[in-house]
Amino acid sequence: MKLLALAVALATGSAAAATSWNMATPYADGEFHTQNIKQFIDDVNKATDGEIDITLHSGASLYKAPEIFKAVRSNQVQLGELLVSSLGNDDPVFQVDTLPFLATNYDDAKKLWAASKPYITEALKEKGAILLYTTPWPGQNFYTKEPLNSADDLKGKKMRAYNAMTSGIAAQLDAAPTTIEVSDIPQAFSTGQIDAMITSSATGASSQAWDFVNNYTRVNAWLPKNMIFINERTWRRLDEATQQAILDAAAAAEARGWEMSAEKNAASEQILAENGMNVADANEALTEALTEVGHNMADEWTQAAGEDGAAILEAYRSSK
Ligand code: PCA
């Protein structure tokens, strides 16, 4: 009996000494991406009988966005969340995720993801991280003080950028880009650092854009994705059953995240309107001018991304 009690105590002891991991995201607690991650963390914990215990550090509280990848790669935190395109300076393949006017709705975004996933998974692995899942933000739309009737209205505007591609778009529109983290948007507007931005309804609502701008113009220029990834060495050390449990939770999170994104888009646009913002579709002239910008940027990108880039675009186009 005593031996059995000891065995039980040891087993309980080992459960108490669960593997503790840390995870960093730039996005706030209330963000739907973050809520999805919390569910993923719970699922992983349950599926591994409490063995894997992940502590989430949200809102850039542990690392700011530009530091998160390095922190995961060096195993200072084991998991991270970032925009796919945030690694675009290291490898252009990551920029496919924010090419303007390539995929402007959820169906197309899914097809673009199917076409680019093998390349992005591989590029991430080369950098020392394993991709677990991705979830899209809603379509990217303009926030301006005055109604946006033509691309010329953006000339000279101080536009917020969040990656190389958004800086490039601003530059092509003769606007002046400034890179601002999502958590700093309200301050950037109130101090006059920016007077316009392109982002989702979700981010506009969570940063209370109506305090600074009155017009939300839908162009759905792209649906950028967040990727959730884990340090490669940490991953390799796991047994197969644990890896599978995490992959199953990740697959569920990905499916859930795409649904949440669409729901969040509808709800957030309603919040923008309720707070007095003028919610409108882009007119034809604006759409045409932006489509041209999109073509230019896709051409530039294809040159930078070489054969892989061409293969992704071909796979995407033939899946449409
Ligand atoms: N929100 C994030 C990325 C895209 C989005 O919709 C941001 O604005 O930084």
Image: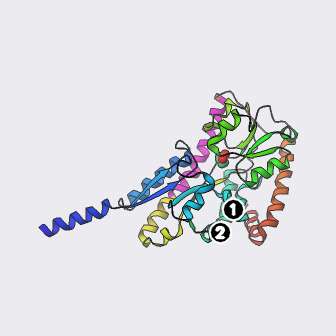
Question: Which element type, helix, strand or loop, lies under badge 2?
Answer: helix
Residue 103 is labelled as none
Three-letter amino acid code of the residue under disc 1: Phe
- Counting from the top left corner in percent of width and height, residue 42 is at 42, 53
Q: Is residue 131 visible?
A: no
- Counting from the top left corner in percent of width and height, residue 94 is at 69, 62
Point out the image quarter for the N terminus. Answer: bottom left
User: Which one is in front, 58 or 136?
Assistant: 58
User: Which one is in front, 61 or 244?
Assistant: 61
Three-letter amino acid code of the residue under disc 2: Ala
* Left/right of residue 304 with respect to residue 234 in the rendered view: right
* Left/right of residue 77 with respect to residue 272 in the rendered view: left
Q: Residues within 10 Å of mark 2 (few under 14, many from 20)?
A: many
Q: Residues within 10 Å of mark 1 (few under 14, many from 20)?
A: many
Q: Which stretch appears magenta? A: 252-273
Residue 94 is labelled as 1
Question: Which element type, helix, strand or loop, lies under badge 1?
Answer: helix
Q: Residue at x 49, y 72 (%)?
A: 236
Residue 110, located in which quarter of the rendered image?
Answer: bottom right
Disc 1 + disc 2, Cβ < 8 Å: yes
Q: Residue at x 69, y 45 (%)?
A: 180
How many labels, in total? 2
Q: Residue at x 86, y 51 (%)?
A: 292
Q: CA distance from mark 1 to mark 2?
A: 8 Å
- Counting from the top left corner in percent of width and height, residue 102 is at 76, 55
- 52 drawn magenta: no
The numbered mark, 1 or 2, whose residue comes first in the sequence reads 1
Q: Is residue 218 above or below residue 246?
A: above
Residue 123 is labelled as 2
* Left/right of residue 302 with respect to residue 62 in the rendered view: right
Cβ of mark 2 under 8 A from ligand 1: no
